Image (cartoon, rainbow, N blue to C red):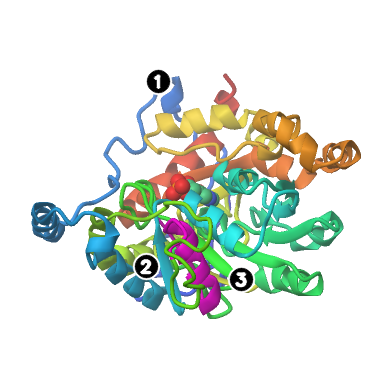
Amino acid sequence: MKTRKITRRQAITAASAGALGTFVNWSLPSFTINSNNHVKLAINGGEKVHPGTWPQWPVWDQAAEKNITDMLRTGRWWRGDGEHVADFEQRYAGLMGAKRCLATASGTTALIIALKALGVDAGDEVLVSPYTFIASYNVIFMNKALPVFVDSDPETFLMDPSKIESRITDRTTAILPVHIYGLPVDMDRVNAVAEKHNLKVVEDACQAWLGEYRGKKTGTLGDAGCFSFQNSKNLPSGEGGAILSNNETLMDRCNSLHNCGRPVGSMPKTSAYPISGTNFRMQQFQGLILMSQMNRILKDADIRLANALYLSARLKEIPGIIPFKPADGAERSAYHLYPFRYISKEFNGASKERFISALNAEGIPCGAGYGPQNKDGLIEDMLTSKGFKRLFSESRLRQWRAENVLPGNDKLCSEAVVFYQSILLGSRSDIEDIVKAITKIYENRASLKG
Ligand SMILES: Cc1ncc(COP(=O)(O)O)c(C=O)c1O
């Protein structure tokens, strides 16, 4: 019989990887894995570990109802006619510790504008994380630049800073690290490479509200940081986004670019529309929803953190389950998702897909995370497009294809399993059920393979 116990000391060591809110209670029940503990897995017709429900998302706030109805009746729905978007910008900048915030229609539009305002232009190259949502590299294409993927560190789930420098060419103008799932990238190392090679840094913090790195919030660590408030996000408003920066001139430029080129602050006022811009404005409705969601964001973040730390301390005791490792300097994750790696050989060779199905059958929702985005077919479509052939030489594109080999990221994609953020808003007994379900699957791995 194989048994393992987790001690309180091990739990506290795990906790030191992140800041603890007052919510955290480190009473770990003793934990035993027993290889002879055979019961029927739910996927094979046995009883579910968690027959109950999970917290739903998003959660609406009754206090917002009257404000939204009042605003509806005014007819002042666009930001130019009202105060709600500006109010939100001020509050969000204050929360995140940035001088300025510009609200946008979405996270995608925030990223497009930030890159453009920092000078990314047709024919440039931008270094980007491959373990991410498709928008992180689509925004580079939207600026007619070439995304160049930097391999991931499978342990942290993030861009590996040691792999950045070798991907720089004379066309590289910016680095776009992604704090995926809310996990802070080691930004000191990213910024050091950027400074050495005179590159701009745009943080994709679209999943990283309230993440912390060396005493600062994620999204305030580069030249600009971009956020998403799409419906699934920890701060939701249906659609929505924001750019944060301490650079006033840059923010004036972002504002102007997102508002049809109208002059703002330090921008030249030579005409009504002195620069070529577009319309990526946020609406008043979105501003109001965000203001109401801001009332819960700190409390929710503390609950997610406490449950995630507890989960990490427990899951790492199960053979074949490897919780993410915080990058150097990361003090707090925003936990848009909670990620770990599944090592199939420890589970009798059962595939990741089978493990996920088994966990779902036990009543624990989870997903497979991102696929290898650097191999996405749309990239080849872009590289072979008429415009791209004009912008980049055959030999450059050939070299791009030859170097687009990312073993760290491939490993990560094949092993990652994720829990959605609202799961982390569950009770301690809900979280305990996750541990029980994975332990049960491990103990009964002999019957797991389909
Ligand atoms: C990492 C990342 N970047 C960018 C985006 C784009 O944000 P939006 O959907 O608000 O346009 C998202 C949205 O899911 C994201 O997760």
Judge from the rendering whether residue 348 lies leftward or rightward of residue 15; answer left or right. right
The residue carrying mark 1 is: 45
**Magenta segment boundaries in residue numbering:** 241-262
The x and y percentages for residue 424 are: 38, 53
- Relative to 388, say whether 59 is above or below: below
The x and y percentages for residue 102 are: 42, 66
Q: Which of these two is toward me, 345 or 55?
A: 55
Marks 1 and 2, the one that precedes in the sequence = 1
- Relative to 352, say whether 424 is above or below: below
The verdict on residue 264 being magenta is: no
Looking at the image, which residue sits at the far right?
395
The x and y percentages for residue 179 are: 57, 59
The residue carrying mark 2 is: 302
The residue carrying mark 3 is: 222
Marks 3 and 2, the one that precedes in the sequence = 3
- Relative to 365, say whether 274 is above or below: below
* Quadrant position of the N terminus in the picture: top right
Marks 1 and 2, how far apart in space? 37 Å
Q: Amino acid at mark 3?
A: Gly
Judge from the rendering whether residue 334 lies leftward or rightward of residue 326; answer left or right. left
Q: Nearer the viewer, mark 3 or mark 2?
A: 3
Assess whether mark 2 and mark 3 are in contact (beta carbons under 8 angstroms).
Answer: no
